[in-house]
Amino acid sequence: MENTDKRTNKCTGGNRLLIIGILVFISTTMIMTGLFISLKIKSDEKDTCDIGWSLYETTCFNISTLSLSWNLAKDSCRSMDGRLAEQITEGKHAFIQQLDVEIHGTALDWLWLGGTDIDSEGNWIWDDSKKPLNLTFWRPGEPNDAGSEDCLATQTGVWNDIPCTAEKQFVCEKS
Ligand SMILES: [Ca+2]
Ligand SMILES: [Ca+2]
């Protein structure tokens, strides 16, 4: 009788281990599957853009066909969960020109970017991040605030300050 009890206990112990093993296996599989799915969603977000937007590094860019004042252009980018392109690097600068040629067949378009000195004359900042313009591509002699010019536009790879009320195409970006 005592021997039988011992055997039963042994069997129960073995079963318990087996069940724990199975549970651990199932939990690990579920965690790994969840991790894989979340990583995939993340990488999908980074590697693709909405239709009409083009990827440069981890940011999506859109050049409008509409021409609007700088303020309305800013609103338009925001309505698409983006902002006027800002913190321009050499790479972004080149990408925007290339994108303009691809979309419109020309680099002659005036395009609004997110820079402005509307709050403090001569102190140029990026509107959305409020960061100063570190790297700049001003045309020689610009910015000149000729007749009150407080918004940044790019054309043929060089920048000019022009009146914010001018209606221009614009570059939106979103991450
Ligand atoms: Ca100005
Ligand atoms: Ca100017």
Image: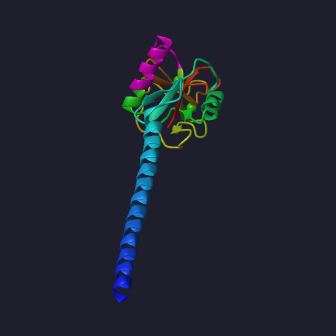
Q: Residue at x 47, y 38 (%)?
A: 45
Vertical relation: 55 (above or below) 156: below
Total residue callouts:
0
Q: Residue furthest front?
A: 1
Q: Nearer the viewer, residue 44 or 98?
A: 44
The chosen color scheme is rainbow
Q: Residue at x 56, y 40 (%)?
A: 128
Residue 174 lies left or right of residue 16; in this view the side is: right
x, y percent for residue 137: 42, 28
Q: Nearer the viewer, residue 160 or 101?
A: 101
x, y percent for residue 44: 45, 37
Q: Nearer the viewer, residue 6 or 175?
A: 6
Q: Residue furthest bottom?
A: 2
Q: Nearer the viewer, residue 143 or 133?
A: 133
Q: Quadrant of residue 92?
A: top left
Q: Residue at x 46, y 50 (%)?
A: 34
Main secondary-structure element of the magenta-colored stretch: helix
In which quadrant is the N terminus drawn?
bottom left
Segment tinted magenta in the rendering: 94-110
Q: Quadrant of residue 11?
A: bottom left
x, y percent for residue 118: 60, 36
Queried whether the magenta region covers residue 140, the answer comes back as no
